Amino acid sequence: MPVKIESRVLDFRKESFEVSYHFFLCEESGEQFTTTSLDELNMLQLYNQYRAKHNLPFPNEIKVVREQYGLPATKMSEILGFGVNSYRNYEAGEVPSLANARLIQLAADPAKFLNLVELSESLDTAFKKKLIRRLEALIDEQQANLFSFELQDYLLGSLVADEFSGYRRPDLSKLTEMVVFFSEKLEPWKTQLNKLLFYADFLTFKRSCFSISGAKYRAINMGPVPNNFNSIFEYMANNDDIDIWVTPFPDGNEGEQFKSRPSRKCRLEVFSELELEVLDTVVLKFKNVSTKNIIALSHLEKAWIENEKDRKVISYKDYAFDLSM
């Protein structure tokens, strides 16, 4: 039985949200049913919209906050005054209360987290001193890397997880690894690469309710492309992550082909098992597809058809589940 999708309204914490509800339909009996994986897909859509509406951190963001300090989840719970397993549960997908979410967001800033640590009365003295030294070093490092944060803002736009980023905080380093991956596997031309990135991010969202890179995609005449893609690719080339070979064509135009550097291999460890599976699926799907044909295929996508006229940024929430893959 194929998976059916229909628009339904679900409730969470006394609020209602419209989701693309996935279910199986028995054509003989008319009975509808779901599996555990479909239930998770349906509920993740609900949770994601609630988080975005109230500016709550997403699970991967909650995990990153803890990992930058090198602390176990139980210790983070202790410092923030949560129940012993609360932080671990939030990383696993449980939606925190508004109050706890604000504390986690406060803790994301090393300077503010330092204040929380200094106020904590439950930490062992020696551990507390060691953690304070680490936080002071992180604060200094953060000041030194301020330009890097500003650059990401410029290249990727607002670093907020929402429906236009696939509920993933835009991550330039992960987008870079995607470009390196496709350059190694396919040596694509720029127009092809833009479509490969689009299909990889949107297919991952279709399967998990989260994109890979958090990149925002805009519909233009040549199909969906990452927002600000020329500047992003130029930065990657200047950073020696990839090589861009320029080839003149007989008609006077030039083509840019992306090739991997022998000394720069893709860091596969940054991707989850699902993300790697999707990347391989996209390579297999398009490895023998020409630039002209991949443009034509992208023009069949609802995501492009309904957004190209006004060159809109494409919502993952509204269009990923209609993807042809």
Image (spheres, rainbow, N blue to C red):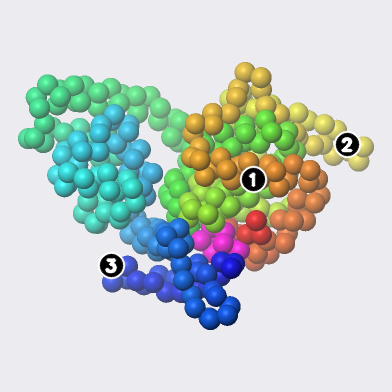
Q: Which residue is labeled 3 in the image?
A: 13
Q: Residues within 10 Å of mark 2 (few under 14, many from 20)?
A: few
* Towards the viewer: 314 or 319: 319
Name the residue type under label 2: Phe
> Which residue in the protein does label 2 denote?
249
Which numbered tag is attached to residue 82?
A: none
Q: Quadrant of the C terminus?
A: bottom right
Q: Nearer the viewer, residue 84 or 236?
A: 84
Q: Check disc 3: other Cα within 10 Å, few if <14, some if 14-19, many if 20+.
A: few
Q: Amino acid at mark 3?
A: Arg
The amino acid sitting under disc 1 is Thr
Give the residue drawn at x 28%, y 71%: 14
Kindly state the secondary structure of the residue where label 1 is placed.
helix
Q: Which residue is the extreme one toward the left?
A: 121
Question: Residue 133, percent across and down?
Answer: 21, 21
Which numbered disc, 2 or 3, marks the residue closer to the eye? 3
Compared to 306, does 258 lie above or below? above
Q: Does the magenta stretch mainly form a helix, a strand or a loop?
A: helix
Is residue 136 visible to the viewer in this orientation of the structure?
no
Residue 246 percent across, percent down from the top left:
78, 30
- Earlier sequence position, callout 2 versus callout 3: 3
| Residues at marks 2 and 1 touching, judged by CB atoms closer than 8 Å | no
Mark number displayed over residue 281? 1
Q: How far is disc 3 from disc 1 in space, using C-alphas?
A: 37 Å
Q: Marks 3 and 1: which is nearer the front?
A: 1
Q: Which residues are magenta?
A: 315-322
Instruction: Answer with mark 3 or mark 1, whichever residue precedes in sequence.
Output: 3
The spot of residue 102 in percent (x, y) is 25, 50
